[in-house]
Image (cartoon, rainbow, N blue to C red):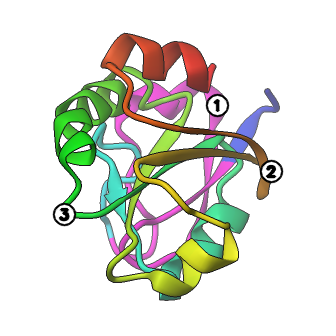
Amino acid sequence: MSDSVHIACPSCLAANRVPAVRLGEDPKCGKCGAALLDGAPAELGEAQFDQFVARTELPVLVDFWAPWCGPCRAMAPHFERAAQSLKDRVRLVKVNTEEAPGLAARYGIRAIPTLVLFRNGTEAKRMSGALDAGALERWAA
């Protein structure tokens, strides 16, 4: 990893340069003051998704889900635990496919939950189905 890492703010989408050695120190957005790596999954819609993924140099793990989906609801607490555990290494994001059908269509989401890992703004791998926190952490590594 280089000396600094660019991380998009989930609130205002500003790109923030954070020294790599300070990633674990709960950095804040220089523009709006929101937490950049708070250990909770960021919830993104169609308007924020592309900028967030493009401006974040950490890998971005996206959970495409829907509120009516039983396996999605069962995986949610595991996804939150994995977000806390991986907070300074991988940015976890949730996309509600009911509220962002364009993103779901663009990425060919045909089953939920579907996990997509982006590295440097490009899809690196994907998997459909629910995982527990440990499996999520291993899969995202």
* Circle 1 crowding by C-alpha within 10 Å: few under 14, some 14–19, many from 20: some
* Circle 2 crowding by C-alpha within 10 Å: few under 14, some 14–19, many from 20: some
Q: Please tell me which residue lies in front, 32 or 111.
A: 111
How far apart marks 1 and 2 lie (CA) works out to: 16 Å
Q: What residue type is labelled 1?
A: Ala
Instruction: State yes or no: discs 1 and 3 in contact (Cβ < 8 Å).
Output: no
Element type at marker 1? Answer: helix
Find disc 2 in the rendering and name its residue.
Answer: 120
Q: Which amino acid does label 3 sit on?
A: Pro
> Number of marks in the image?
3
Quadrant of the rendering where the N terminus is positioned: top right
Front position among marks 1 and 2 = 2
Disc number at residue 75? none
Location of residue 18 (image quadrant): top right
Quadrant of the rendering where the C terminus is positioned: top right
Marks 3 and 2, the one that precedes in the sequence = 3
10 up-or-down from 103: above or below: above
The magenta segment: 6-32
Q: Position of residue 128 (x, y in %)?
A: 53, 40
Specify whether 35 is left or right of 70.
Answer: right
Identified at 48% across, 54% down, the residue is: 111
Q: Where is residue 93 in the image (x, y as percent from the top left)?
A: 43, 53
Element type at marker 2? Answer: loop
Instruction: State yes or no: discs 3 and 2 in contact (Cβ < 8 Å).
Output: no
